[in-house]
Amino acid sequence: MDNKELEKLIENLDNIVPTITTNSSDEEKQKVLEHINYVLGLAPQNETVLSWKAIYYMAIGDYDNAISVCNEILQINPDDQMAKSTIKDCEELKKLQTEGYLDSRYDYNNHSGPDLLEKVPVSLLVTAKIIILAALIWFCCPALILSFNDNKILNIKDTSAFETIKVNPLSEYDYLTKKQIFDIRKEHVKNSLFAKTNYEPDKNVFGQIQDNKPWWGAITCNQLDYKGDYHERIEGPSKVSAQMNNPNALVGLSLPFIPWDQEYNKEFCTSEYGRFLPVSIQYDKKDNLIVAKYKLTRNFLKFRAKVNGKMTRYPIQLSGLNARDFGYDYVYAYNTNNISMFSDSNNVTDDVKNFTDFIHLGGSCKYKDGCNNISPLQYDKIITVYRLPAEINLKLWKKQPLNPYIKADMYYRIIFDEK
């Protein structure tokens, strides 16, 4: 059997395992278990298949076997967080089961109970118990039930088979009309993953662009003791073009606080990487995963700036300009590595947040009559990188999800490698 056939069998588990509940017939349960074991026979150490087997046992209330399977996973990969959390959840559910809260057995022929229960149809009692069990599992371990796909995405490390997306360079937008800017945008979208007939840039995102105005340039540092007219801030390619010219980069990056040009950070002030243009973008259609890679130097990790009264590594803001334009208004960071959040609480790693990015004419550039630029500052989406390589994994939705564990409409991974 080739790898493609095996992948189809594994993918089929996504469809059949979630159909099993404690109320499924023995025949249905046995059929699904046989399918799982058949696939395991072909790939005995496949973590995805073993994870589905653990979920199967948990769904039918066999927590001991679920724990046993999770221990098999940990023998293969001691760092598997899903297996660890599943064991913990199963222990809690076993405890509830021991205390009688999850006891599915009921002697419906025993008439020693209250007369009212004797008159209640057996089917209704069974349904009620299933609802209670589902509610307990939902509140005890929602991450297990709903984030299996997240863990599957995280385990995708080999992107060699992904589609490679062209990264377009920055360009200058200064003094162009709004129509000219829209025409540039339409051309790039036409050649993107999100191409569609009669595309028009979202008015909530791009509607406030002003005709014949300058734009913030790709400036990376401010000059100390500056007394000029700030024309340097609009020179060269426009900063926002890194995103507008690359619609596939759903979540862009920018420096919300520009550091001073000093001797110790000359490297950054003259660097190309400070423009935060991806070095590569890849896409996997099967899992709806986009991977954007950036390069940073080790020196970047040493640079510090004083922001809001505290010294910090250079903050990098996640920008949802493209995401909003295509309807992906909601974001949640479900996994980070060697990345810290600028705000200690109520940030994108704590709960689902909505992007608010849009372009308008503002005075932050300090050049006469202002510049077209992105607003607002979003503290809940600002990150710092403290070691390389680093990455942040995001979930994007078009409609606000009930909770962060819901399967995403699009997965987006940002990787920082060493330059």
Image (cartoon, rainbow, N blue to C red):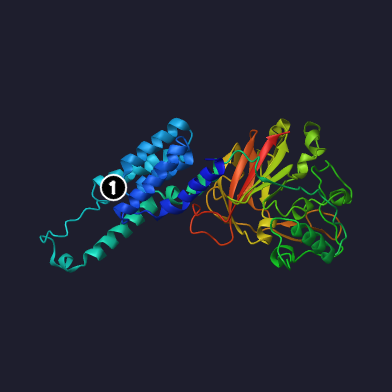
Q: Quadrant of residue 400?
A: bottom right
Q: Position of residue 64 (x, y in %)?
A: 31, 40
Which residue is at 74% across, 63% downward? 206
Q: Position of residue 154 (x, y in %)?
A: 55, 42
Residue nearest the viewer, comparing 133 with 208: 133
Residue nearest the viewer, comparing 114 with 127: 127
Left or right of 344? Residue 270 is: right
Can residue 362 be seen by looking at this rendering?
no
Left or right of 102? Residue 165 is: right
Left or right of 333? Residue 308 is: right
Above or below, 278 against 188 in this view is above
Q: Element at badge 1?
A: helix
Q: For the view shown, which residue lies furthest in the left direction?
A: 112
Q: Position of residue 343 (x, y in %)?
A: 59, 46
Can residue 200 be seen by looking at this rendering?
yes
Mark 1 sits on what residue? 96
Which residue is at 83% across, 66% downward? 179
Q: Position of residue 110 (x, y in %)?
A: 12, 59
The residue carrying pointer 1 sits among few (fewer than 14), some (14 to 19) or many (20 or more) residues within 10 Å by Cα, namely some
Q: Quadrant of residue 369?
A: bottom right
Residue type of the residue flagged with mark 1: Leu
